[in-house]
Amino acid sequence: MKTFHYELVKDPTYFCDNRVEAHSDHHYYENAEKMEQGIEDFRCSLNGLWKFHYAKNYGNTIPGFEAESYCCHSWDDIRVPAHIQMEGYDAPQYANVQFPWEGREEIGPGEIPTEFNPVASYVKYFEVPEKMQGRRVFVSFQGAESGLALWLNGSFVGYSEDTFTPSEFELTPYLKKGENKLAAQVFKWTSSSWCEDQDFFRFSGIYRDVYLYAIPEVHVQDLKVQTLLDESFTNAELDITLKATKGGRVRVTLSKDGGKLQTLEETLEEVSHYVMKVAAPKLWSAETPELYDLLIEVTDENGVLNEVIPQRVGFRRFEMKGNIMTLNGRRIVFKGVNRHEFSSVTGRCVSREELVKDIVTMKQNNINAIRTCHYPDAEGIYDLCDEYGLYMIAECNMESHGTWDTQEHSTERNYDAVIPGDHPEWQDMMLDRVNSTYQRDKNHPAILIWSCGNESFGGRDIFEMSQLFRKLDPTRLVHYEGVRNDRRYNDTSDMESQMYPSVEDIRAFLAKDSSKPFICCEYAHAMGNSCGAMHKYTDLSDTEPLYQGGFIWDYIDQSIYKKDRYGREYQAYGGDFDDHPCDYNFSGNGIVYGGNRDASPKMQEVKFNYQNITAKVEKDLVTVINRNLFVNTADFDCVVLLEKDGMLIKTAAMQTDAEPLSEKTYPLPVPVQTLPGEYAVTVSFRLKKDTLWAKSGHEVAFGQGVYRVEAPAETKKMAKFRVIRSAHNFGVKGESFDVLFSYLNGGLASYRYGGVEMMKMIPRPNFWRAPSDNDCGSLMPMRYAQWKTASMYLSHKYPTGGRYPGATAPEIKVTEEYAQITYTYVMPTTPESRCRLTYQVYGDGTIRTTLSYDPVKELGDMPEFGVMFKFDADYDNVTWYGMGPAETYVDRCRGAKLGIYKNKVQDNMAAYLVPQECGNKVGVRWATVTDRKGRGMLFSGDCMEFSALPYTPHELENAMHPFELPQVHYTVVRVSGQQMGIAGDDSWGAKTHPEYLLDVTKKMEFTFGFKGI
């Protein structure tokens, strides 16, 4: 009898023992009726409560617990599937590059932590279901992290590593009648953990489904289907290979939409190969995910039905033509995301509902591709991508970032330090992972590319992984990004793949080397408030044929529900679990929030940049550019909307007929307007009928054009006002308002409208924003720190060295039209700088405000140039005429539309993991903040930027979690000429692109107005 030896867990050559060979993920049923009802008599779930013991290392486990005679009924219960860290044992730990044990135990490859390396011992008592008795019985662990040893009734069954693909074992020799005892030990860190250093939360335990399955006497163990299309894509061969336990007969039926197309009946051997010729198949793509149904009926030699197998088939051909990747003969562009398998509730144990929401959200926002970073996901997503239409890079479970991080920029590289590198002892493990990835998922048309893994440098082992993928599957391409750091085996990847290059770097690379197509397997690092200038990448795919798109990093924030000390839930990140070492909030990179999986404001820009139809709108014409590969624009409803000053005045339908990859120009069905006003013409493409992912009417693309008809100049009768002068204050009164300017305090101290005081703070020039994650990564707070102190501590006074500071007296000017007062503020910068704030008060209560500054060369540009106000929190309703509906920035506003929008002040607080700059709006013509009665303040300007939040930038900056923010007392309004772009090429050094910085080459001046309402 074999026994288990724990010492082998640290040996990279010991990664499986008595494990069932990897095979396809197909399901099988007793008969067709049960198949239609989803009744799997051959399968019995073992999900649910298991008996459980936790030990912080192997030395603290219970020896002999697996013995049949050892009673575990009194042990604690734990749910399966689940991470033990989400069930009250150990703690989640978030680490990016560093290994989670660094600084705690000094170990190297070939060693594993011993002082702290949690071991989870599981026991499940079960009886074999009646329908499974008398058959060969197996157990499937769909995912266990990171090593699993298994016993049944005291006998050692086997061992497996590879956290993210199934570990299956035959139980038949060890079963007995009545109650059986299944015992498992799951080790948090094993030898394979050196190659599972992905950028994610570190968990352990049995976190995917567990089930028993039995097989009939004649059983198809493995199924492979391939669709081989001819050069014209009008005829195909459906190539089917079956591996069976023994011979029999098989009937194979191909159907489409319920109609049978053809059937073949053949002898079934242990390995059988069949071909169906299919004329004019409907081709599968993300745009048109056409699927066929293959039904395989297996009988024994006497004609007795043993099983039926359903398999969905998508006819498509993905290949390299020259140096361009093509799908069904046409150049493909990946508009993708990296997607970690993650739930804020259950970690990497994602529910079906959460999974479907992800897929639906992606489709609704024009995302057409997923990279399964950086491991195989649970089975469900692959079926959904087939059905809904999403391309996939299916990634093997490998990342050893922590072993080569220090070598990346070294002039003398130590290749021996890199895992797996060229080490022969790691090669078999890596090849096993390739095989497991391929065998399980090979039949999914959604998978276009296999990937060897992520951020593991280069070397012979990874090259051999790519070669095995090619040997197993010549119908797909192979991806691996890490060769850019180690070009010794450049042929490892069929395409040039890089992370976070600038657009300029991509162009420069392709100018030198055009031998392969280029993709960004990661780009547009979406950490916190991000995705600025993303359009540069998507525009590049239109002008550079070799650039074939990229995958945003990443789809969802990795955050976990936690409660603060007062019982309020929040989204926790690294360090919140006292998990050290950790990488804090670097897991917050999603374009959807971790908690509810709802789209963040960044998604507005992603949807626009990824849309397949462009509408270039002029006054009376629209040019429609159709970038779909296979779909005509006639398949969508086209609706034209005409708005005047934000109000809809006309809607008209328009027929379009732009073929795939073509463009046409059409006259607009709305006349050019002549009456004075600002007009917005929006051309909107919408679904004609319901789909799996959206109802009819859902907008898939739009374009908008804006023009203005000027009104003739007219003379307005000016309302009267009077001026009140005193020793310490300057006042202006009109019929419905009065304002008070303080000489002592240096600004607008009071604005009463209708007898109600509006001001809670003297308005102040503001040059600062709460740093975003990108800002912190590029050291913006350090580089721009003087502008923060300038915003906080500027004064109309100045130090004199005496007892009292001096003060610059405000300049006052009174005309028949207005009363004007100008304050000069000294700013505590080096060298010293000054700005001026001028108020022109008119008789109707309007205050025309101008902020001016003569740039000081040594200080450079600033984060923001504007004025900050504080109002009572009762003024919590925001309406604006400008770009929306989501927040916008000068480098992230293409996906917005000009219109009138409303929300609450609190709605402008984006739920980024760490409070930071958010809620800005560009292109604002006017905005109001009002109370529930509609009373408040109106701001107006010429395409100004506007923000209304419950907090100042300084309050936001001081909080690392939303619960650390103070209670809401105010509505803080910031009106600015411009805020610097939000950036986002990466979050560890990439700065805002120069064209989205504030221009300090000449005098800066910003004018806007405000008035009580």
Image (cartoon, rainbow, N blue to C red):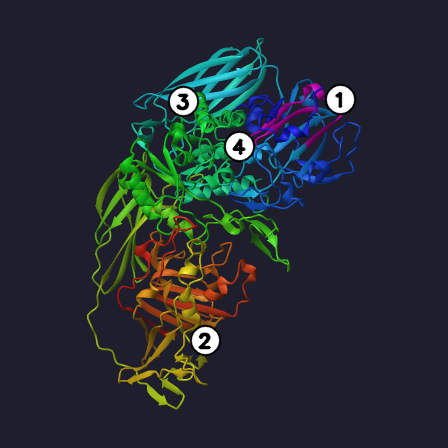
The residue singled out by tag 4 in the image is 379
Q: Is residue 227 above or below residue 51?
A: above
> Does residue 15 appear in the picture of this structure?
yes
Amino acid at dot 4: Glu
- Give the label, 1 or 2, closer to the camera: 2
Residue 85 at x, y percent in the picture: 64, 44
In whole angstroms, how far apart are the C-alphas of marks 1 and 4?
32 Å
- Under circle 4, the secondary element is loop
Amino acid at dot 2: Met
The residue singled out by tag 2 in the image is 761
For disc 1, the neighbor class at 10 Å (few under 14, some 14 to 19, many from 20) is few
Residue 171 falls within the magenta-colored stretch:
yes
Residue 810 falls within the magenta-colored stretch:
no
Which of the 4 quarters of the picture holds residue 737?
bottom left
In whole angstroms, how far apart are the C-alphas of marks 1 and 2?
80 Å
Amino acid at dot 1: Lys
Residue 474 circle label:
3
**Mark 4 or 3, nearer chain start:** 4
- Give the label, 3 or 1, closer to the camera: 3
> Does residue 626 appear in the picture of this structure?
no
The span picked out in magenta is 156-184
The residue singled out by tag 1 in the image is 177
Q: Quadrant of the C terminus?
A: bottom left
